[in-house]
Image (cartoon, helix red, strand yellow):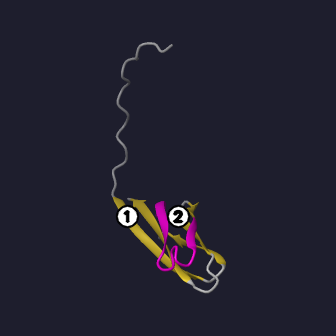
Amino acid sequence: ATGPQGATGPQGPQGPSGTLKPAVEEVSDTVGPDTVDSDHVTCPFGYIVTGGGVSINNGVGQFGAYVSGSYPEATNVWAGLVTNTSGSSSVTMQIWAICVSFS
């Protein structure tokens, strides 16, 4: 059973002041036929990665290419993985990292 809610606690201390500085970094790579390829994009020095993504610019579906991974690889790196099951066509993958710095 749950009891009654307690009293509200005191307000916490003021956090540090500062400015949020965003940056978007990008890298492109060619993925050959019948290939699984990975690459990564690194945030600028002093930035951390808060998100990212991977896209395929040509060949999606028609040639059997798909994004098979998109994940943070380190605190300042986003990685992507593309599988190209085409027997004859290359595709281009793009990886983005959304980075921030606080000052």
Q: Nearer the viewer, residue 69 or 39?
A: 69
Viewer can see residue 37: yes
Residue type marked 1? Pro
Give the residue at the far front of this rendering: 62
Query: Residue 73: x percent and y percent?
Result: 59, 63
Q: Which residues are magenta?
A: 47-68
User: Where residue 82 sits in the image (x, y, percent)?
Assistant: 58, 72
Residue sitting at 49 percent across and 77 percent down?
Answer: 27
* Residue under the point 62% across and 86% down: 88
Image coordinates for residue 69, horizontal then vertical, percent: 58, 64
Is residue 51 rendered magenta in the image?
yes
- The answer to whether residue 98 is above or below residue 62 is above
- Indicate the quadrant where residue 36 lies: bottom right
Q: Quadrant of residue 79?
A: bottom right
Say which element carries label 1. Answer: strand
Is 72 placed above or below 11 here? below
| Disc 1 crowd, CA 10 A, few/some/many (<14, 14-19, 20+) | some
Identify the image quadrant of the C terminus.
Answer: bottom left
**Is 96 drawn above or below residue 34 in the view shown?**
above
Could you tell me if the residues under marks 1 and 2 are in contact, i.e. CB atoms within 8 Å? no
Which residue shows up at 55% across the image and 60% down it? 75
Q: Is residue 73 positioned above or below 28 on the image?
A: above
At a point 46% along the width and 13% down the height, the residue shown is 3
Residue 76 numbered tag = 2
Type of the residue with mark 2: Asn
Give the number of marks.
Answer: 2
Query: Which residue in the protein does label 1 denote?
Result: 22
Mark 2 closeness class: few <14, some 14–19, many ≥20 residues within 10 Å: many
